[in-house]
Amino acid sequence: MKPDQLNRTFAALADPTRRAILAKLAEGEATVNELAEPLPLTLQAVSKHLKVLEQAGLISRGRTAQWRPCRLEPAPLREATHWLERYRQFWEGSFDRLAAHLHEIQKGDTHG
Amino acid sequence: MAETSATNGTPTREFTITRVFEAPRHLVFTAWTDPRQIARWFGPVGITTPLSTISLDVRPGGVWQLRMIDDADGAEYPLTFICREVVEPERLVLSTRVPTGPGPIVRQAVLTVTLAELGDRTEMTFHVTGLAMSEENAGLESGWSSSFDRLAEHLTPVAPTSSGAAR
């Protein structure tokens, strides 16, 4: 588990526009123009978001100077999802026990 | 409605769990605020939270402390919450405190428990926001997030524990 990477991932994901960009990239590679098209943003603004995503390692960009298609890098996203899922499981497990506990106390044997 | 996935599996720092319990609302509320009851359910199977480690000051600004113990290896995970809001029997807001001891708070997640009556049953909505594993708590011994993370590692057979490097 790498706290720094996870934190970078979550910080990059905090913005809804960046999440929208990632969602679009989940369908396949896209250029800045293609990404900007459905968004109410200038190319410049989209480029800024792409830079944040790239620095967080969530996307990579092609080398070709003009074309530079963006591509999703799934590993950090998977890691973040996995971490959240385990965190969530902690509480799900607790609530299973809470349900059992509530069942018990209503049978009348609270005091043990 | 899981909010874990915001868009196409993109994780966010928050999530919601909704559960319906076969119990009236006041009982569910008390299960959250009575130390004897917390001791019976806090933490998944494999975790014990002894009554002797639990102290709950149930009022705004009150401190909640407890210590979870991993049944498998005896590892202890202290937790500190600050009680933010208490609206009996329908709402409870807690924030986590990192570090767990004294000193300035460097990180907090907010946990909101909302209880709605469904006849004789109760719908609980548990919302967590502000989750992060951060650089700062990587250096803390008992950071709440990292405690849970380690706990979760114990609870998840997928992840063999091989933590040689200092975190």
Image: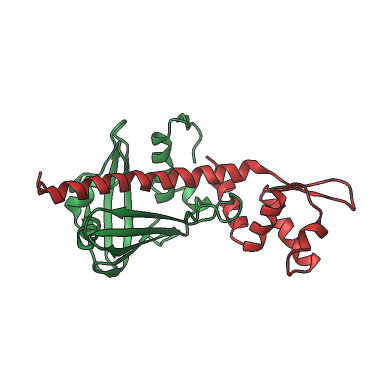
Q: Quadrant of residue B49?
A: top left
Q: Nearer the viewer, residue A1 or B13?
A: B13
The residue shown at (21%, 47%) is A101
Res B99 visible: no
Query: Farthest front residue?
Result: B119
Question: Residue A35: x percent and y percent?
Answer: 77, 58
Horizontal arrangement in the rendering, residue A17 relative to residue A36 (left or right):
left
Q: Quadrant of residue B111?
A: bottom left
Q: Nearer the viewer, residue B93 or B146?
A: B93
Q: Is the C terminus of chain A in the top left, top right, bottom left or bottom right quadrant?
A: top left
Horizontal arrangement in the rendering, residue B51 relative to residue A96 (left or right):
left
Horizontal arrangement in the rendering, residue B10 relative to residue A27 (left or right):
left
Q: What chain is the red one?
A: A
Question: Residue A30: x percent and y percent?
Answer: 79, 51
**Coloring basis for residues:** by chain
Q: Nearer the viewer, residue B138 or B45?
A: B45
Q: What chain is the green one?
A: B
Q: Quadrant of residue A86?
A: top left
The residue shown at (51%, 34%) is B165
Question: Residue A26: x percent and y percent?
Answer: 69, 48
Horizontal arrangement in the rendering, residue A73 relative to residue B45 (left or right):
right
Query: What is the tally of numbered marks visible in this picture?
Result: 0
The residue shown at (40%, 55%) is B98
Relative to B48, does residue B13 appear above or below in the rendering? below
Res B160 visible: yes
Q: Nearer the viewer, residue B70 or A26?
A: A26
Question: Residue A27: x percent and y percent?
Answer: 71, 48
